[in-house]
Amino acid sequence: MKKAFIFHGTGAGKYDHWFPEIKKKLEAEDIEVARPEFPTPENQSLENWMKVLEQHEMEIDSETVLIGHSTGAVFILSVLEEISTTVEASFLISGFTGPLHDERFDPLNESFAEKKFDFQGIKASSKEFFVFHSDSDPYVPLEKAAELAPKLDANLELVANAGHFNTESGYTDFPELWRELQRFL
């Protein structure tokens, strides 16, 4: 791995949660890190997020690791459908497909999550997948991760009492993620 992309989720930004700490640790290992800032919640759509990624100066290639949180994890699935290379690994934290049955988030996530995914193509675009989920996530039910992991031939890494892996849940660092990322250094 020489590059890493960190994709935030709905209502967050590149300076939130554990993103700065993981960036710092990766950069200390001479990994180039990109954290695009996507429009959210205003103007949030898959199309608008893809435009931001297309305009980013760093490109995704075979030496890239993708890391996504919540809607950012769902965004990775669409990115993998579009790219013509195979990345080193994809880390999906609190990821999901389909509606969450939450009127606060379903309209914002619809273009990302409520579509038919090409899981064969997605699996061909990433050498490995890691699905992290918490048994206490207040936004994304555990069932969503249990549905997603088998579609990607990924192990589901269940983290006890981690909430939504956000600052509110005490996640300004993410040791479980860092442990797995180190395999690619």
Image (cartoon, rainbow, N blue to C red):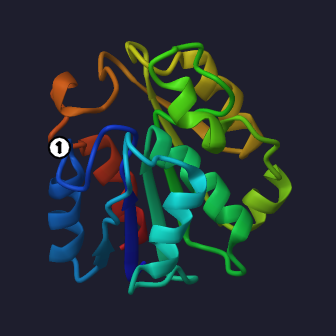
Q: Is residue 177 left or right of residue 122?
A: left
User: At x 37% / y 45%, what residue is drawn?
Assistant: 40
Of residues 160 and 147, which is closer to you in this image? 147
Q: Quadrant of residue 100?
A: top right
Q: Look at the image and tell me whether residue 156 can be seen.
A: no
Residue 171: where, in percent of width, then height?
19, 34
User: At x 17% / y 43%, what residue is drawn?
Assistant: 173
Residue 93: where, in percent of width, then height?
44, 40
Of residues 116 and 51, which is closer to you in this image? 51
Secondary structure state at the residue bearing disc 1: loop
In the picture, the quarter occupied by the N terminus is bottom left
Residue 75: where, in percent of width, then height?
56, 52
Q: Quadrant of residue 172?
A: top left
Of all residues shown, which one is farthest toward the front? 43
Q: For the residue carrying disc 1, how many other residues have a C-alpha within 10 Å: few (<14), some (14-19), or many (20+)?
A: some
User: At x 21% / y 23%, what residue is drawn?
Assistant: 169
Q: Look at the image and tell me whether residue 181 can be seen.
A: yes
Residue at the disc numbered 1: 173
Q: Is residue 120 left or right of residue 127?
A: right
In the picture, the quarter occupied by the C terminus is bottom left
